[in-house]
Image: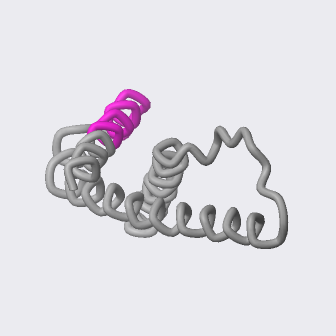
Amino acid sequence: MKTLKQILTYLIWTVVALLIGIIYIYLFLGLGFKTENSTGFFGRLLDIFHEIIAVHVGLRIGGVIALLFILLDIFYLKKNLNNDFKSTVIRFMVMLMITLLVVIIVYIF
């Protein structure tokens, strides 16, 4: 039962990391702030491809964030933190710091 709970916890953290990755790409590409409407069939088709590619790249970046977070949690955080609300907030802040590190690396490359 303990391993099932741990797997469920990491699954939730993975979903959070994937959402953070998708939100980052949407903010990076400015997809949330469209001001002009695409006209015609090909304009709409390009919009659809643009959003599909953004989600695809966002999921990959979120996967990297999740992998780094889970490895850090297994080897370091789990040994030093308890399972309470304060630990969850600390884990979320660590995930945001990992996100910042990944964002910096993406900008460099």
Instruction: Count the marks.
Output: 0
The segment highlighted magenta reads 83-97
Q: Residue 49: where, in percent of width, then height?
A: 63, 70
Q: In which quarter of the image is residue 104?
A: top left
Residue sitting at the far top = 86
Residue 90 among those drawn in magenta: yes
Q: Quadrant of the C terminus?
A: bottom left
- Front residue (pair 57, 99): 57
- Front residue (pair 68, 70): 68
Look at 30% across and 46% down and name the residue there: 103
Q: Residue 44: where, in percent of width, then height?
A: 77, 65
Residue 95 among those drawn in magenta: yes
- Front residue (pair 45, 39): 39
Look at 15% across and 56% down and name the residue there: 75
Q: Residue 25: where, in percent of width, then height?
A: 48, 51
79 relative position to 61: left or right: left
1 relative position to 54: left or right: left
97 relative position to 17: left or right: left
Look at 51% across and 69% down and name the residue there: 56
Q: How is the image coloured?
A: one colour
